[in-house]
Image (cartoon, rainbow, N blue to C red):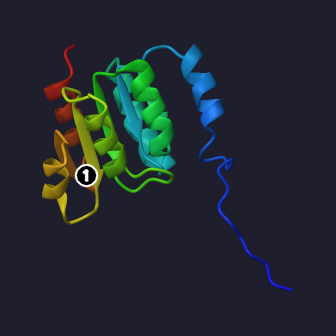
Amino acid sequence: MIDILLPCNNSPQYQPAMAQQYLETAQPFDIIVADDETAIATVIADLLHEEGFSVGVFHDGASALLAIEAHQPGLVLLDNTMPVMTGEELLEKLRQRGFTELPIVLMSAATRLDEFLDKGATEVIAKPFELDKILSCVDTYMQR
């Protein structure tokens, strides 16, 4: 007997119906953080909450796209390596859909950081990073 494992779109990482239902009832977000590493996303969100911002956290690019379109935040912080849709793919979709003025900061351990700027990232943060770098981006792109 051979077992074959296939990817499934109704996995806990990607449930668009649930994400859409949540977005319809959620408060608007000042900042959206999209990172599949829960610990990193939580630390960033907690830091930004302490600074007084409303933060939405998403763990895949597709859910983040729904949230950005629904809430039109003032800043987006994206990890590049996420399931369903990478940060780079999400960046390209947002720019194609008219989010040309939205500050999008891409966080990546990749070495090709300049390519992300060429594709429309407002800024790129190399991982690993200090939390002060996140606060610097917030100070630069968000009006308090």
Question: Taking the image as drawn, is residue 67 in sight?
Answer: yes
The answer to which of 129 and 101 lies nearer the viewer is 101
Q: Residue furthest right?
A: 1
Horizontally, is 97 left or right of 15 in the view? left
Within 10 Å of the Cα at label 1, are there few (<14), some (14-19), or many (20+) other Cα atoms? few
Identify which amino acid the numbered label 1 is placed on: Phe
Residue 97 rendering spot, x and y as whole percentages: 31, 31
The answer to which of 91 and 25 lies nearer the viewer is 91
Instruction: State whether residue 9 is above or below residue 55.
Output: below
Q: Residue at x 31, y 35 (%)?
A: 94
Residue 57 rendering spot, x and y as whole percentages: 47, 34
Horizontally, is 78 left or right of 17 in the view? left
Instruction: State whether residue 86 is above or below residue 22.
Output: below
- Quarter placement of the C terminus: top left
Question: Residue 30: which quarter of the image?
Answer: top left
Q: Residue at x 15, y 48 (%)?
A: 117
Question: Residue 48: which quarter of the image?
Answer: top left
Q: Residue at x 28, y 61 (%)?
A: 109
Residue 91 rendering spot, x and y as whole percentages: 30, 43
Horizontally, is 6 left or right of 111 in the view? right
Residue 87 rendering spot, x and y as whole percentages: 35, 48
- Quarter placement of the N terminus: bottom right
Question: Taking the image as drawn, is residue 29 in sight?
Answer: no
In what element is the residue under mark 1? loop
Circle 1 residue:
129
